[in-house]
Image: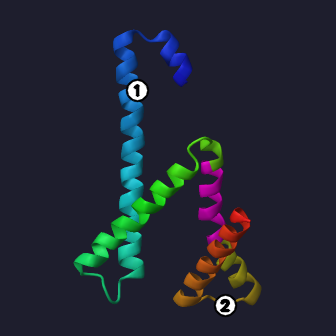
């Protein structure tokens, strides 16, 4: 769509089209950063550090730094970045579901968190080596 629109749009509308694409990307990234920081603040720091200033700062810095690291590591191939993010979002949630089905009991919050952490660690080891 981008190349096609750059070929058929007049000069003024090309700028509006590019500005619209960038606005959509920035808006999506802002929404994802907000959701991730809310998840970190309310789910992981709910009991101890929920209302502290440092928890709020930390909950913004962690997703933002993770996003910057991903963007710098996959600058050449956006499709590979998309597939990697998809696998890191789907697989860690799939493992606790399988464990619950196999053992026919619900996982506690700690067991669920540990299973996700271990899954992500194993995925990182697999991707790095």
Instruction: Tell me if residue 78 comes above or below residue 119 in the rendering.
Output: above
Residue stretch rendered in magenta on the structure: 81-93
Q: Where is residue 33 in the image (x, y as percent from the top left)?
A: 39, 58
Residue 116 x %, y %: 60, 77
Q: How crowded is mark 1: few (under 14 residues within 10 Å), some or many (20 or more)?
A: some
Q: Which residue lies furthest to the right in this view?
A: 102
Task: State the SS at label 2.
Answer: loop
Is disc 1 in contact with disc 2, using a CB cutoff of under 8 Å?
Answer: no
* Position in image of residue 67 (x %, y %): 47, 56
Which of the 4 quarters of the picture holds residue 26? top left
Q: Residue at (35%, 83%) from the top-left corner?
A: 46
Query: Where is mark 1, residue-wise?
Result: 18
Instruction: In the rendered view, tell whether residue 104 sits above or below residue 54.
Output: below
Closer to the camera in the image, 71 or 31: 71
Q: Which quadrant would the N terminus be assigned to in this image?
A: top right
In the rendered image, which quarter is residue 51 located in? bottom left
Majority secondary structure in the magenta region: helix
Disc 1 to disc 2, C-alpha distance: 51 Å
Question: In the image, is residue 88 part of the stretch drawn in magenta?
Answer: yes
Q: Residue 105 carries which label?
A: 2
Image quadrant in which the C terminus is located: bottom right
**Above-or-below relation of 106 to 59:** below
Disc marking residue 49:
none
Q: Identify which residue is drawn at 63% across, 82% down.
A: 115
Instruction: Decide if residue 37 is on the left or right side of residue 107.
Output: left
The reply, left or right, for residue 108 in relation to residue 52 is: right
Instruction: Answer with left or right where residue 109 lies relative to residue 35.
Output: right
Residue 124 spot, x, y in % from top left: 65, 68
Closest to the camera, between mark 1 and mark 2, is 1
The numbered mark, 1 or 2, whose residue comes first in the sequence reads 1
Q: How crowded is mark 2: few (under 14 residues within 10 Å), some or many (20 or more)?
A: few
**Closer to the camera, 107 or 45?**
45
């Amino acid at each position: 769509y981008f190349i096609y629109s750059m070929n058929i749009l007049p000069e003024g509308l090309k700028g509006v089209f590019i500005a619209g694409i960038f606005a959509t990307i920035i808006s999506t990234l802002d929404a994802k950063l907000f959701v991730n920081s809310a998840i970190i603040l309310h789910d992981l720091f709910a009991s101890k550090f929920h209302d502290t200033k440092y928890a709020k700062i930390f909950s913004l810095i962690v997703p933002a730094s993770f996003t910057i690291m991903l963007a710098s590591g996959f600058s050449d191939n956006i499709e590979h970045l998309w597939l990697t993010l998809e696998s890191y979002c789907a697989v860690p949630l799939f493992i606790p579901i399988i464990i619950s089905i196999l053992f026919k009991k619900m996982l506690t919050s700690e067991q669920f968190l540990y299973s996700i952490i271990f899954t992500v660690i194993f995925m990182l080891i697999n991707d790095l080596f």
